[in-house]
Amino acid sequence: MRVAVLLFAAALSGCQSQSVPCEVPSPPVPDSLQRDVNALTTPEMAGRKTGSEGARLAADYLVERFSTLGMTPWHGSIRHPFQYGPGWLAKSGENLVVWVPGPPPYRLVMAHYDHLGRKQGQFHPGADDNASGVAVLLALAEQAQQHPPAQGVIFAALDAEENGLYGSKALVQQLTGVELEWVLNLDMVGRPPKDGRAQLWWRHGWQGGEQALNTLQPHLCTEAGRRRMKGQDGIHYDSLHASDHYPFHQASVNWLYLGVPPHRDYHSPNDRAERLDYPFMSRVLAASWALLNRP
Ligand SMILES: [Zn+2]
C-alpha cells in the first residue's frame, strides 16, 4: 500500500466505528502463513525494495514456493520481468505469475511482494505490507492447485508497488487480450482494526462488488470501504489510487481490494511478523477461497 494516499485514512481511522460487533470463528490456521511471512521478513531480504538483492531473494523464494506447489507457470515462465521509468533511467522489476488452468473468464488474485527496504538506516520488514497478502496468496494458490475452481485462476506476486504501482501496470500489459472476470488485490491483510473488520473496496458501480461482500461476510467480518474521505487538513483521500487495483481500473477491469485500514506500524520498522494476527489471516484465506468458488 502506498503512503501518499493513505495519510488521511490514518488520520480518520479513529472516528470510524459505530458498528455492530461481528465475530466469525477462525478455521485452522495453515502453518504456511506464518512460515511465509517469517521468510519474507528476514533481515537477509532487507525489506524487499524493488531492484535490491533482498527483492531478488524474495522473488527466488516465491518461485521456489510456486514450483514446489506444482503450479503451472503463466505462458511458460513464472518470472515476468519488466522495465519502468524513462529511457536511460529505466529500472527493472519482476512479477511472478502462475495459474490453475480452467475455462475463461479468468479470475486473478494478486499481492505485491516488494516493500521499502531500509529508510534512514532502519530495516523495514513489511510484514503486514505486504508479506501478509503474499502468504495468503500462496495458501490460496495451494488450495486451488489441489481443488481447481470451475474457472481458470491466475495468481500474481507483484513487484514495484510501493514506488508507483509499476508491477501492476506491467501486469495489465502482460495480460492484454486475456479475458478477466475480476481481479482481487490482497494488500495488508494481517492486522485487523479494533472492531475486527476487514475492508472491501471495488469498482464504483459494479454490482459484483456487493455480491462479493456478501460472499466474504460469513467467513470474515468485512465492511464496504469508503471510497472518498476528507482529511482534517481538507485534502481528499481516494481509495482508488491506493494500491495495485488502480491500473486494472484504468484498463476497465472489475476489481476488488481486500485489506485492513492503516495502523500505527504502517510503513514503520515495527511492521514485524510477530505483530500479525494469523487467525485473522486464516479468515481472509477462507473468505477469498469462497470468492474463488462462487459461481
Ligand atoms: Zn506500503
Image: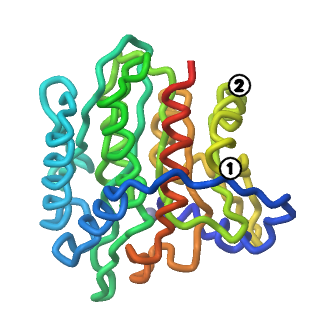
Residue 245 seen from this side: yes
Q: Secondary structure at mark 2?
A: helix
- Label 2 crowd (10 A; few <14 / some 14-19 / many >=20): few
Residue farthest toward the top in the current orientation of the protein: 103
Colour scheme of the picture: rainbow
Q: Nearer the viewer, residue 86 or 113?
A: 113
Q: Amino acid at mark 1?
A: Thr
Task: Please name the residue shown 48% across and 28% down the image.
Answer: 251
In the depicted structure, whether residue 48 falls above or below residue 286? below
Report x, y in % for residue 205: 72, 29
Query: Ligand 1: does it lie within 8 Å of the C-beta at label 1?
Result: no
- Sequence-wise, the earlier of marks 2 and 1 is 2
Task: Give how far apart the Cα atoms at labels 2 and 1 are.
Answer: 17 Å
Task: Please name the residue shown 64% across and 33% down the image.
Answer: 212
In the depicted structure, whether residue 97 falls above or below residue 51? above
Q: Is residue 127 left or right of residue 258?
A: left
In the depicted structure, whether residue 14 falls above or below residue 173? below
Task: State ligand 1's quadrant.
Answer: bottom left
Q: Secondary structure at mark 1?
A: strand
Q: Is residue 81 left or right of residue 222?
A: left
Q: Amino acid at mark 2?
A: Gln
Q: Nearer the viewer, residue 181 or 2?
A: 181
The residue where tag 2 is placed is 207
Q: Nearer the viewer, residue 241 or 293?
A: 293
Residue 252 seen from this side: no
Residue 222: mark: 1
